[in-house]
Image (cartoon, rainbow, N blue to C red):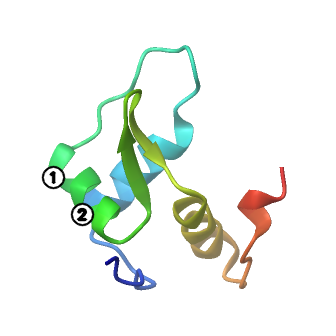
Amino acid sequence: MTQAPTETLPEGHLRALQSLAERQPGQDSNFVNIAAAQALTSLGLARHSGGGWEITPLGRNHLLRLVSGDDVDGVANAR
C-alpha cells in the first residue's frame, strides 16, 4: 500500500524525481539515487520496470504542484 506524498520531499528525493522527469526514451539515463527512487516508489511517485526507474503520473503531478502551487490533478495524464 502506498502512502500519499506530502507537499515537501527531502532534497535528495526531489532531485531524483526531477531526474526521472527529465529522462527521454532511447537516451542514456542520468544518475538516479536508488534509495531515493525506492522511497519515491513507496509514495507512488515512481516505479521500476524492465526499462529502469520511471516517474509515474502522480510523480509528474507532484512536480507540477511544486512549480505552479495550484491543484493540477490530472494534468500529466492529459497527453
How crowded pointer 1 is (Cα within 10 Å; few <14, some 14-19, many 20+) is rated as few
Q: Could you tell me which residue is drawn at 63 percent across and 69 percent down?
A: 67
Q: CA distance from mark 2 to mark 1?
A: 6 Å
Q: Is residue 18 left or right of residue 33?
A: right
**Do the numbered discs 2 and 1 sit on residues whose CB atoms are within 8 Å?**
yes
Q: For the residue marked with disc 1, what is the amino acid? A: Ala
Q: Which residue is mark 2?
A: 39
Q: Nearer the viewer, residue 63 or 45?
A: 45
Residue 59: x and y in percent read: 52, 62
Residue 57: x and y in percent read: 60, 59
Residue 26 placement: quadrant: top right
Q: For the residue marked with disc 2, what is the amino acid? A: Ala
Q: Secondary structure at mark 2?
A: helix
Residue 31: x and y in percent read: 29, 31
Q: Is residue 25 left or right of residue 10?
A: right
Residue 41 placement: quadrant: bottom left
Q: Which residue is mark 1?
A: 35
Residue 21: x and y in percent read: 53, 45
Q: Could you tell me which residue is drawn at 28 percent across and 52 percent down?
A: 37
